[in-house]
Every structure is written in structure tokens, then in C-alpha cells.
Amino acid sequence: MSYKIVLTDYEFPDLGPETEVFARAGLTLTPNQARTEDELIAACAGADAVLNQYAQLTPRVIRSLDKCRIISRYGIGLNTIDVPTATELGIYIGNVPDGSLEEVSDHAIALLLAVVRGLVKFDTAVKAGKWDYTVVKPLYRVRGKTLGLLSFGNIARKVAVKMAGFGVRIIAHDPYADAAEAKAMGVELVDLETLCRESDYLSVHVPLVEQTRHILSRDQFAVMKPTAIVVNTARGPVIDEAALIAALSEKRLAGAGLDVFETEPVRGDNPLLAMDNVVLSSHAAWYSEDSEYEIRSKTAQNVVDVLQGREPTYLANPDVAGHARARAGQ
Ligand SMILES: NC(=O)c1ccc[n+]([C@@H]2O[C@H](COP(=O)([O-])OP(=O)(O)OC[C@H]3O[C@@H](n4cnc5c(N)ncnc54)[C@H](O)[C@@H]3O)[C@@H](O)[C@H]2O)c1
């Protein structure tokens, strides 16, 4: 049986890992770089399966997928997919929740330490022939500080374990977390205001959903310490970027390490680009050669699973189970 498998968009230099997985199953992939709703609807017409990186699969796009049995998202976040519409239509959603936990937690810590230790300022100064430790003044000792985690999910828990060796006190805000599990890891669960008030370093790990959009905004930055540093490796829109920029430029916050932005790629006129107290990367916290191969192979394998009559290895919308099979007979 031949199936149409459509890739909506991708930023990889090739499609090697995906092609390998599909070839083993006798399947082929049709790649696209669609972005707008109309481009996506045209590209995905007649698709049995859709792979998705960053293009927004809105309710209108998903309703046009009349044969599709699975949408398989590269990575963890599902904010590119209107999950309720796909679930209502009986479309499986697959993702890869375990492909980059080490990388993202390492990256959050790398961004934090880069700001805490003034690494980018040092690098710029030394390369410009300036041998002067005062270019970073003032820096403060890490040991004894309070690290706040916004969410206590998989990545945040890895950050907690890795940062414990730095001698920090760790607090977290996550209304759905298990307090006993947190306590066993030496982490205290607190409300959002306490998290903002007490954190010297605040690392953001919430998924982007309606309740977390702009979860950090003017009111939250207003209660933070002027010496505090914010790190975001989750999703840009969970922070009100205008409020963050205002707090940084008015010195109500000391610095930030950001992998994600409200608009990506980040716009050339974004004031963050001109700030020397922020360190930036390009939504690449997930990346290592290892995680890239793992995520891309597993994204393809979710599709193979469903087209061969099984549930995806990583089922992200378990509510679909009752009626997903209805699509198989179409
Ligand atoms: N920058 C990157 O390259 C990259 C890579 C992977 C993941 N991510 C982002 O990281 C996010 C977290 O990943 P994860 O693997 O830890 O996810 P996860 O599902 O394990 O954890 C998410 C946590 O957020 C909590 N949460 C939900 N709503 C909340 C709220 N209102 N306030 C506080 N906590 C709330 C949940 O209870 C859960 O514990 C992903 O959703 C994704 O957007 C980014």
C-alpha cells in the first residue's frame, strides 16, 4: 500500500535519518517548506501522515487533513499543533519527549553560567586585546544563591539534579508537580510570586499553552531582585518580551540567557540584540549530533508505527485512542 507522508517544514541540512527510517518500511517522504495556512493546506492535501517542525497547524489546516492518521512533531512542545482539533478528528499526535532532555538542561545551565560568569563580555574584551577583569564587574558567587525553576517537568528536574552540585538552594513553581517527589530531590515547591521574589536565577521550563502565555510579565519582573538573571529555553511567548526588555534596560533585572523569542527567527531590530547583559542562542537548546539523530529518527518512527497499524511509540494525545482507529479504514 502506498502512503503520502508530508513534511510541512524543516531546518535540517538534509533528511538522512528520516529517509533511512522510511526506506526500511518501504515508504517515502515528501518534504516542503510551507508556512502559511494556504501553503500548508496545499502541501498536505491527501496526506496519510504529516511531520511537523515549526509551521503552525491551525484548526483550519487540521480540518483540511481528511485522510491523515498521524501528525508527528519533531521534539517535545506541541504548541505548533491545535491538539483539541486533531484529537476530535481522531488524528494521533506523536512527539519525542525524551530526545533532548540532556541537551536542553545543559543549555539552560550554560546560558545561566555564561551570564553569571560574564563569559561573552570577557570573550569580546580578550579578542579585542583588552586584558581587564573589571569589564565584567560586578559578578557574584553562585554557591548559596537561590535557583528558581518555572515548572518541575522533565527538563527542570534535570536542571535541578545538575545544579545541585553548585551548592544552590532550589525552589520550583509547578501546580501539577508532586511535592513529595520534589522534596525527595531537595526542591521546595512554591507559588509563582514567591518564585519570582526569591530567585537569584530563574530558569523557565513551562510548555506554551494558553495558561502560560506571558506567565512572566511586568508584575512578575516587578517583584524580582535587581540582581536576578532569567533564563528561557522553553518557548518565547511564555515571557512578555517587551516587559523583559524594559526590566533589563531599566536595570530592574541583571541579565538574561535566552534560547527562544516571541518572534523567531529573532528580528534584527529586537533591542535584546544590542544588550551586553544578555546571552542569546537560536532556539537550539535541543541540539547535539546525538539528539538530532534521535529526534529525527523517532519522529519518522511514530509515523511508521501508525501506518503499520500500531499506536505511535510516543502518543501525545492519549484521549484520541477511542476513535483514532476510525481513520484507519478510510
Ligand atoms: N529550546 C529548545 O530547543 C527546547 C527543546 C525541548 C523542549 N523545549 C521546551 O521545554 C518545555 C518543557 O519540556 P519538558 O520536557 O520539561 O516538558 P514536561 O512536559 O516534562 O514538563 C512540563 C511541566 O510544566 C508544568 N506546567 C504546566 N503548566 C504550568 C504552569 N501554568 N505553571 C508551572 N508549571 C506548569 C507541568 O506540570 C510539567 O511538569 C517544552 O514544552 C518545550 O516547549 C524547548
Image (cartoon, rainbow, N blue to C red):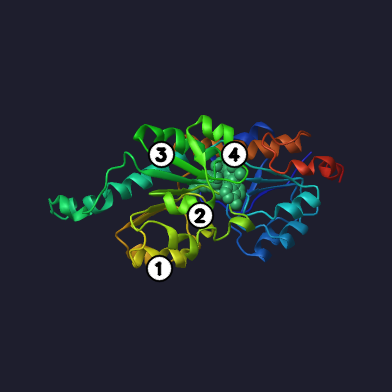
Question: Which corner quadrant holds the N terminus?
Answer: top right
Q: How many marks?
A: 4
Considering only order in the chain, which callout, 1 or 3, is on the residue closer to the N terminus? 3
- Mark-to-mark CA distance, 1 and 4: 34 Å
Residue 169: mark: 3
Ligand 1 contact, mark 2 (Cβ < 8 Å): no
- The answer to whether any part of residue 15 appears in the image is no
- Mark-to-mark CA distance, 2 and 4: 29 Å
Q: Nearer the viewer, residue 194 or 23?
A: 194
Picture coordinates of residue 315 (x, y %)? 70, 39
- The answer to whether any part of residue 171 appears in the image is yes
Q: Which amino acid lies under the numbered mark 4 shown in the image of this protein?
A: Pro
- Mark-to-mark CA distance, 1 and 2: 19 Å
Q: Nearer the viewer, mark 1 or mark 2?
A: 2
Q: Which amino acid lies under the numbered mark 2 shown in the image of this protein?
A: Glu
Q: Is mark 1 in CB contact (under 8 Å) with mark 2?
A: no
Q: How many residues crowd mark 3 within 10 Å: few (<14), some (14–19), many (20+)?
A: some
- Determine the residue positioned at 87% across, 42% down: 329
Picture coordinates of residue 169 (x, y %)? 40, 39
The image quarter in which residue 35 lies = bottom right
Picture coordinates of residue 312 (x, y %)? 71, 36
- Determine the residue positioned at 54% across, 41% down: 152
Q: Mark 1 — residue?
A: 246
Q: How many residues crowd mark 2 within 10 Å: few (<14), some (14–19), many (20+)?
A: some
Considering only order in the chain, which callout, 4 or 1, is on the residue closer to the N terminus? 4
In the picture provided, is 85 more to the left or to the right than 78? right
Ligand 1 contact, mark 4 (Cβ < 8 Å): yes
Q: Mark 4 — residue?
A: 97
Considering only order in the chain, which callout, 2 or 1, is on the residue closer to the N terminus? 2
Q: Nearer the viewer, mark 3 or mark 1?
A: 3
* Residue lying farthest to the top in this orientation: 184
Q: Nearer the viewer, mark 1 or mark 4?
A: 1
